[in-house]
Image (cartoon, rainbow, N blue to C red):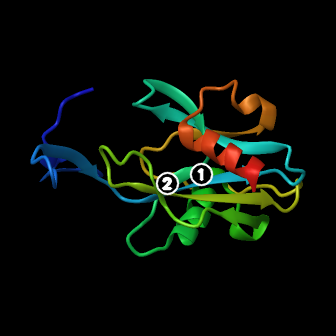
Amino acid sequence: GKEMTTNELKFLRVRVEKHPTTDTTLEYLEHHNAIAVLILDEKEEKVLLVNQYRPGNRGNLYEVPAGLIDANEDALEAMYREVLEETGYKKEDLEFIYRYPKGLLISPGYTTETLNFFIVKLKNQGIIPEEQQLDHGEDLFTEWVAFDKVETLDVDMKTVFLLNLYKNI
């Protein structure tokens, strides 16, 4: 990809600080916190994944729905908003199952971003989702995938983490 100056960046803020004991310079990215949500079908046999291009992958990837938390909302509100935007399912369509008690740092060596994890279930297989309300620049499709097939796909760590979290709650 093209190299940019830090003041051209929209979502990331490059920061440096001195290590508290070694006095070395640490570089890191300040980033908004985010949510990720495992959506199960009514029978809890399939999960709803989104497929989209990701620069870290240099290609398309299957993932659980996820997105940034806006300044004026909490993680739970952000989760329901992102589900509606990316999948078309409304809050009323979903049964709340689980929320990990706190946001987890996704990679504390280089970013301040935390990820809040949720698990929800579709109340009824017959529910027809509304049209997606994708953010500008988003291009993704959704697909219901059987549990045992997910790990055969190109997926990311948050997706595998949420699948394993579900198996252990």
- Could you tell me which residue is drawn at 49 percent across and 32 percent down? 53
Point out the image quarter for the C terminus. bottom right
Asked if labels 1 and 2 touch by Cβ distance under 8 angstroms, the answer is yes
For mark 2, does the 10 Å Cα neighbourhood hold few (<14), some (14 to 19), or many (20 or more) residues? many
Residue 7: percent from left, percent from top: 13, 49
Question: 150 above or below 83?
Answer: above
Point out the image quarter for the N terminus. top left
For mark 2, what is the residue? 67
Residue 99 in view? yes
- In three-dimensional space, the C-alpha distance between marks 2 and 1, rounded to whole angstroms, equals 9 Å
**Front in this rendered view, residue 56 or 90:** 56
- Could you tell me which residue is drawn at 18 percent across and 31 percent down? 3
Question: 79 above or below 19?
Answer: below
**Front in this rendered view, residue 112 or 120:** 112
Residue 10 in view? no
Q: Secondary structure at mark 2?
A: strand
Residue 81: percent from left, percent from top: 57, 64
**Front in this rendered view, residue 3 or 151:** 151
- Mark identifier at residue 74: none
For mark 1, what is the residue? 86
Residue type, label 1:
Glu
Question: 140 above or below 43?
Answer: above
